[in-house]
Image (tube, rainbow, N blue to C red):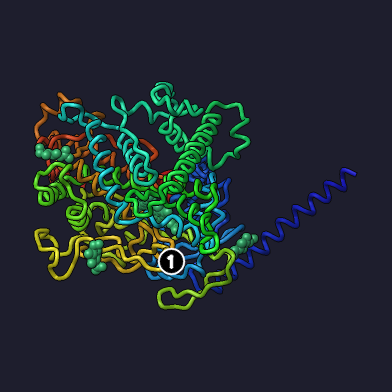
Amino acid sequence: MWSMILLGFCAYLLYLVASTFLGFRRNVSKAKQSGIPYVVVPVYYLKTWWLVGHRLWLPLLAKLPRQWTQWVDFCIPDFYFRRSIEVFQQVGSDTFLVVAPGGMVLHTADPAVITQITTRRNDFPKPTPIYRSLDIYGKNVVSTEGPIWRQHRKATSPPFTEKNNHLVWTESIDQASAMLSSWVGPDGKGDITVDRVMDDTMRLSLYVISRAGFGKKLEWPSADAKADVDANYVDKSKIQNEESDRGRGHSMSYTYAIHCLLDNILFQFLVPRWLLRRFPSAKFHKADEAYNEWGSYMREAVEAKKKDLEVSADESKDQMDLLAQLVKGQVASEKNKANSKDVPLTDSEVLGNMFVLILAGHETAANSIHFSLVYLALYPKSQRATQKDLDRIFQGKPPSEWDYDRDLPALFGGMVGAVLAEELRLVPPVIGIPKSTWGVPDQPITIEGKACTVPAGVYISLASGNVQRNPKHWPTSKPTLPGGHTVHPRANLDNDLEEFHPERWLLDDAHDFEQAETANGKKDMPNETVTADDLAINEAADTSDKFYRPPKGAYVPFSDGYRACLGRRFAQVEVLATLAVILQNYSVELAVDQWASDEEVIAMDEDARVEVWEKAAERARKLMLTGLSVIISLQMRAGHVALRFVPRGQEKFPDDADEKWKAKHPELCEGTRGTPGWRFWA
Ligand code: HEM
Ligand SMILES: *[C@@H]1O[C@H](CO)[C@@H](O)[C@H](O)[C@H]1NC(C)=O
Ligand SMILES: *[C@@H]1O[C@H](CO)[C@@H](O)[C@H](O)[C@H]1NC(C)=O
Ligand SMILES: *[C@@H]1O[C@H](CO)[C@@H](O)[C@H](O)[C@H]1NC(C)=O
């Protein structure tokens, strides 16, 4: 009896191994026929066990002889970012297939290929199964495809208008001023080490979207902002203050519920709801409670909005926030069912979209602010130029007198716009934009002029971060950093594409910002040209007409085509306004506490300051290279870069610290390059 079972089991195993092997061989030959360069590896890198466990294996694999572990080069999550364009140079092609038992992946850093894929949206759909975890409250505009996506996109796009962007502008200025005050202290003297820049920018963008998206104004915590980003922070006092919330049977304040929901986002995605509820762990329960609490706040908001709209039905109302729009669709189609050809969203889909907009909109924009500040601290000369440009635009006027229609275009087409463009070139929050040929037949595609085929069932990843530093498609200059201190150990060693250099966006004739707007017909900020019936597909460029325009497909931080980012202008308004508020009167500098106390720095001569600055810079550069990884977006997760905000004119370190250091240490400037590939991080 047992031997029969054992035999049956063995036969089954044998069958599994054989069929996988045969299927794998078939896939290798498909890859061969595709005409696309390919590599064969033993691990399909989308497998959960590998995604979750690779950190454990890498140090072991690094001990093995290099010939045995070549394949690992192509199987590391986030390898795009860490290995940069080097990974494509290693294969010798900007587009290649990786064939593994279990599946195939197509990687591309070729603008022409990226453009074909983003424009042929029916041929290369989004791989919806991998977005399923975003559906915790319901289906939404990010996670769907085809006709269902059209319905969601139609329902979510109306509030992304210029009118609403005015609100984004005022709210960003308001919150940024509060954030800056918390960084420089009540007396405004600044020069305090701030190590929570990332958390605070996340809070800022969360508050901006709460206001501009859902009409919910949140106040910056007054005293110690640090306390309530702490995951273990207990919000009892807040609840007592917000008596009305408690009165309605809430156990958490709205603010705390949303923070707690987002802090525990991985639990929400990965752990089944029933387990979160039952498992004896305080953290799980808290995560579940936050999920329920935020959900019920949103349901209440939806109900209230519905009542509101039924009573007033005033369509011309100015404050048509996102919630109002979503609910309006529902109410309208209930009123005249016969007339409406649009299927309204269900309640759960309304919630699903509200959640996903918060998710899509808050980390991404926050990262842009955070990384821009880190880069500006690392490149003080670009920072000075940015501040000079702010003086030109605002003439010292306080934010209360800033004007969206006049000043935003000037920011967009000036140095601040270039800073954002450059930050997104180097650190786009989505570094492998997912596409696929799942559920569609083999697709013809032209690669470097040659007719090729993408086999059916392939996962496609558009390597935004790599195409954006691909020297074949971007003008380059010589590297500027001290030698042996290249930004990346292996990639772009002979050019400056790994470096933050916002000036690269300024065309020669646009260096002079004083030029009239109409000079040679170029506008600071292109109008949002919206096409394709109600779907708000935006065909305007990502950056100012006055900037260098990379080839189509070579700059895709917001993706491109039909599935491009819906919140692009929203995000740009928020980031530009926030950076302007911070930099108008303050400079951002690297904090050097790790190497010298305040008294020591004050006593230092310039040489000594250069030395200590370079230490902080070296650490910050290393963290920007090796400390970033993706959960929702590319973020700094292995530590933080501490910054200081000092009144302009009181900077402690020279703007050309890098060059001074280089001049002092010629012997170190011939340093050897870093270790190749993933071993550098293992
Ligand atoms: C710097 C900030 C931002 C960047 C770089 C960015 C980038 C992107 C990218 C690359 C995609 C495509 C993702 C994919 O194909 O899976 C996307 C989609 C989307 N983004 Fe953004 N995003 C930003 C800010 C925002 C903001 C502030 C909002 C909303 C308030 C937003 C809403 C959306 C939505 C709704 C989609 C899905 C669109 C669709 O599939 O129809 N994003 N974004
Ligand atoms: C072969 O490739 C297809 C995608 O084209 C994939 O779905 C399938 O799992 C692969 N089979 C094996 C055994 O690798
Ligand atoms: C910067 O200083 C000017 C002049 O003192 C002031 O009017 C303005 O409000 C300040 N800007 C910010 C963002 O606080
Ligand atoms: C751009 O928008 C402005 C204001 O909305 C409008 O006056 C102008 O005509 C538009 N320009 C183009 C080229 O569409």
Dividing the image into four equal quarters, which quarter contains ligand 1? bottom left
Residue 525 lies left or right of residue 41; in this view the side is: left
**Which residue is found at the position 24% from the left and 42% from the top?**
173
**Which residue is found at the position 29% from the left and 47% from the top?**
167
**Which residue is found at the position 61% from the left and 57% from the top?**
102
Ligand 1 under 8 Å from disc 1 Cβ? no
Residue 87 lies left or right of residue 672; in this view the side is: right
**Which one is nearer the viewer's eye here, 505 or 236?**
236
As drawn, which residue projects farthest toward the front? 311
Q: Reply above or below: 357 against 594.
A: below
Label 1 sits on residue: 118
Check disc 1: other Cα within 10 Å, few if <14, some if 14-19, many if 20+. many
Whether residue 648 can be seen here: yes
**Which residue is found at the position 34% from the left and 66% from the top?**
539
Whether residue 82 can be seen here: no
**Which one is nearer the viewer's eye here, 10 or 525?**
525
Q: Reply above or below: 255 against 214.
A: above
Which quadrant is the C terminus positioned in?
top left
**Which one is nearer the viewer's eye here, 476 or 465?**
465
Residue 357 lies left or right of residue 551; in this view the side is: right
Give the image location of residue 341, x and y in percent: 52, 64
Quadrant of the image occupied by residue 398: top left
Give the image location of residue 527, x and y in percent: 27, 63
Give the image location of residue 2, x and y in percent: 87, 43
Regarding mark 1 in the picture, which secondary structure is present there? helix
What residue type is disc 1 on? Thr
Which quadrant is the N terminus positioned in?
top right
Q: Reply above or below: 66 against 191.
A: below
